[in-house]
Amino acid sequence: MPIGIFDSGIGGLTVFKSIAEAFRNIDIYYLGDTARVPYGNKSKETIIRYSAECGTFLYHNYKIDALVIACNTASSYAYDVLKRILPIPVVGVVLPGALSAVRVTKNKKVGVIGTTATVRSNSYLQAIKTFNEGVEVYQKACPLLVPLVEEGWIEGTITEAIIKRYLDEVIEKGIDTLILGCTHYPVLRPVIKKIYPQLNVVDSSDGIVEYINSLGINTEENAVRHILITDESPSFQTLKDLLIGDVKTEKIELSDLCSL
Amino acid sequence: MPIGIFDSGIGGLTVFKSIAEAFRNIDIYYLGDTARVPYGNKSKETIIRYSAECGTFLYHNYKIDALVIACNTASSYAYDVLKRILPIPVVGVVLPGALSAVRVTKNKKVGVIGTTATVRSNSYLQAIKTFNEGVEVYQKACPLLVPLVEEGWIEGTITEAIIKRYLDEVIEKGIDTLILGCTHYPVLRPVIKKIYPQLNVVDSSDGIVEYINSLGINTEENAVRHILITDESPSFQTLKDLLIGDVKTEKIELSDLCSL
């Protein structure tokens, strides 16, 4: 009873790590669409098409019993479509992250940071309002944070200055909770907590683990961990080594995805 | 007698601008492959395939008489293939940039900055050595500079700190000339000159204009400027407005490229 996870590329490895640690006896297949990363600067139609290709590829080839969309851009634009076209439970990162924030905030003021596309989609804003209409939401697109993580500059004066330049204006609104609305960002949690120690910093991992738990998926001995990528990528390798360690990685052809 | 220019996305607009200003009476077609940008983190095979698709698309659809590869990654990996498959003059950015640097350097020490893929290809190193084997070359990959330009942070303390972090070690080698080995970087020329006022900073534009001039292309009144992109892109729009102004932009289908 395997779980499938896909991301436009690399960031979803933080979600893979959380799920793999929580469910040591469930097979996990991760697809990183490294040939077409990033999705964040693509149009809505393109993001939906790419996401549908990734989800159906995992479903048809690996008989997955649940799909995790470990990409905020894809979750923002393609969650509804994937739920409709796949006959299995689908969970994105937006609803679990929004729910965590609504539970944690005391003063009902929540900040959201993410890629330009995620922020423009207003998906976190809408999700938070669905859970609690009284919560005020302040969003901020932070396009430099992904390349910063992929460059490995996850601490130091430049990293702190960039984070402060993006976040100070959100902090000034009086938020007590910040959603990391991009799966790259958990790597920056320590430096964000260093700059703003009082801030509650939440991401989607806890909520996703809780959701998967609720599905009651059968476990087995010697669970498989398998990582697929659509193109070789040095920064994928770097973050995989940093977060995951020794898991088999296989390159698949992009045409295998597109032909579905 | 039109000229075709292609880039993986946005940066080539700096080359478009130089060519359009130098040749006011030549039709120019620019293709930005914004659906698949960036090429810099793709494998060699993928870069060659995408570049071949862009070049042949412009040749077949717009009867171009010369092709400019306005992308350092594509020039580094796909220049030879494009020269072989197209029956028209092809010019990349690597040879003109390398030639400018060899002409300008006094102490025969040249720095090259670019994306990870461009630096790894050693294409500038090899080109410089071809022109003058005695020139010492120091290369440095600067992956954060492209997102920095696309974010519009082209000056200020963070931008200066990032440039110094990348460039100080190259400057310490004693270079007197720096090649901007990425078509995004000319936008950063003022801040680089501010930090290192003695440095000769060269890019490929002058050499490309000289090359096109040597082709003796017929000119005409009311020259056409036409920009094609494979996906809507807010950062493309931003840089286009900044550099080029009011030129018609048309979205084409990626499948039109791939079907060739």
Image (cartoon, coloured by chain):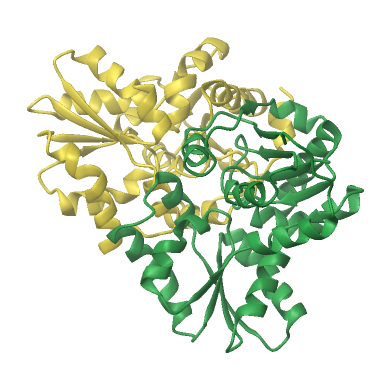
Chain colours: A yellow, B green
Comparing A202 with B207, the one in front is B207
Residue in the foreground of this view, choosing between A242 and B133: B133
Q: Nearer the viewer, residue B102 or B151?
A: B102
Residue A232 image position (x, y, % from top left): 64, 51
Whether residue A221 is visible here, answered yes or no, is: yes
Quick check: A75 left or right of A196? right
Picture quarter containing residue B164?
A: bottom left
**What's the residue at 47%, 62% (across, down)?**
B189
Quadrant in which residue A114 is drawn: top left
Quarter of the figure that contains the C terminus of chain B: top right
Q: How many marks?
A: 0
Is residue B102 toward the left or the right of residue A136 in the image?
right
Residue B235, horizontal then vertical, whole percent: 48, 38
Up/down of A212 relative to A131, above or below: below
**Relative image position of residue B124 (x, y in whole percent):** 67, 70
Q: Give coordinates of residue B5: x percent, y percent.
A: 71, 45
Q: Residue furthest top?
A: A84
Outermost residue to the right: B87
**Residue A246 visible in the picture:** no
**Rendered residue at 78%/48% (across/down):** B67
Q: In this image, B253 relative to A170: left or right? A: right
Quadrant the N terminus of chain B occupies: top right
Residue drawn at (46%, 21%), measured in percent from left and top? A77
Q: Is residue A77 above or below residue B78?
A: above
Instruction: Give above or below for A61 relative to A193.
Output: above
Q: Residue furthest left?
A: A107
Q: Judge by depth and name the residue closer to the eye, A49 or A168.
A: A168
**Residue in the picture at 40% in, 52% down:** A149
